[in-house]
Image: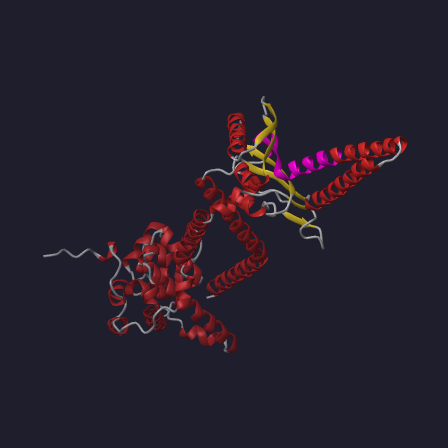
Amino acid sequence: MTVNQIVDELRATRPAAGEALRLQVLTHASAPAVTEPSWRDRLRSRRRLLLALPAAAGLAVVSAVAIGVTRPEQAAREATAPPASVELQRSAGTPRSAGMTLVGPSADSSRAQEKAPAPFAGRAQRYSGSLTLAVEDTDALSEATQRALSIARDLGGYVVSVQYATGDQGAASLTLRVPSTRAAEAVTRLSGLGTIVAQNVQIDDLQESLDTLDGQLERLRAQIAALTAAIDRAETSAERARLLERRAQAQAQLRDLRANRAATAEAARNATIQLDLRTEASSGVAAPGSRLDRALDKALAILAWEAVVVLALAVALAPIALVALAVWGARRAHRRREEDRLLAAS
Amino acid sequence: MTLEQPLATRPPASLAEAAEAHLDDVYGYLLYLTRDRETAEDLANSTFEKALRLWSRFDARRGSARTWLLGIARTTALDWFRSESRRRRREEAAALAERVEETFVEGLSPELETALASLSAGEREVLALRIVLELDGDATARVLGISPTAVSTRLSRALKRLEERVNEG
């Protein structure tokens, strides 16, 4: 008997279920299903898992973009602000007469306005500020320089010196003087000309020096008046000559003191602001991009964090998953071997 | 007037419809596996009871109802083989031999019947699926939980052995 004959005979004698079995099975099969799939059954469904993975990835991307779009300003500040912190230093115990210094970078002009202190009204104070700003390129450097000069003039001040140099990398250094009463406004407006790299404001109280000078002047004037009266009463030419010499000395001191006072008052009247402008390549600071750029930056940063979290979870769970996989594989292999043994022995 | 699609090309609407269409296949497979009509009928009943409980999980996109039912029948038969194995260890082997029918498929020639009885259940199983029920290689592989290549190898060996036994007799 050939294989083909065997196959033909096997197919020709294909078994059929008896009527009793058919009736019994069809009766069972026609009954309503007794169980519904549990939530575990549903969870086990590989199709749902396959859907869950892209859904989770999509949710992560959408949330990152949403946060990036709604909160790009924070990203801009994080991107542009150097890591140093703003520090306000003030001498203890001398709140009005001592110097006050504000140092550190600021991210934008509004923050500069908050941080830059104004001189105290009614007191003579020397206001010195320095700003280092980054601008995009040499064109922006030229424009920022022109605008700085214009700001100084608008505020009733003037330019003490300007140094301007361009090449592969441009830089400009301006020394400006503006009325002290408008110094804070000047710092605020100037800080808007670029990205703040560094900022320093120094306020020194000069009122005490002025008061001292005024007292010395008063005493000298009284001394001169007394000497003049004594000269008139002098009885000898020798005494008269000695008093005249002393009055001349006092008058010379008076002139020095007046000049000194005038210089101090001038220092209090006008603030000095040192403005340094640099192109980005030389400053090493990136200017904030457009809102879209910042939103994308933020979204990418959030996605990166999400990836880090997922990676950390994967690293933590990988050993457990590997062990579970190994156990599952071993059990399956064992079961298959056992089934093969059973079927071979039967 | 609507023309009904044949069951071979569409998934069954209910288990009753699937049972009507594939009961003979399930029974035939179990008969070849167990070589006992009474046992095959019991196991066919158990198979459809299980199928009724699991019917809501049946997904026609992952395989035909026939393959799905034969998979359940195989699991049911393996459970039976396990319990038989335990029972056989407890009882004398002779007791089991009395239960096995000499003629389990009507119409088979005695030499083929004897040759089939000498094969293992695993060999009869692949013959039943590929030759008697005419399942293709992929469907058979799904039922047995092995690769299509392994199915071909098993079938080839089983046929060769069967041919040898028939011609020996």
Query: Which segment is the magenta one?
Result: A256-284
Residue B169 rendering spot, x and y as whole percentages: 40, 59
Which residue occupies 48% across, 42% down?
A294
| In the depicted structure, whether residue B33 falls above or below residue A279 | below
Residue A4 rendering spot, x and y as whole percentages: 33, 50
Q: Is residue A256 left or right of residue A319?
A: right
| In the depicted structure, whether residue B52 falls above or below residue A305 | below
Which residue occupies 24% across, 56% down?
B10
| In the depicted structure, whether residue B83 falls above or below residue B13 | below
Residue A304 rendering spot, x and y as whole percentages: 52, 47
Q: Nearer the viewer, residue A23 or A207?
A: A207
Query: How many discs mark residues in the rendered view?
Result: 0
**Is residue A100 part of the magenta span, yes or no?**
no
Magenta segment's dominant SS is helix
Image quadrant of residue A322? Answer: bottom right
| In the depicted structure, whether residue A77 falls above or below residue B122 | above
Q: Nearer the viewer, residue B77 or A188?
A: A188
Residue A218 seen: yes
Q: Which of B14 and A316 is in front in this view?
A: A316
Image quadrant of residue A45? Answer: bottom left
**Is residue A265 part of the magenta span, yes or no?**
yes
Image quadrant of residue A132? Answer: top right
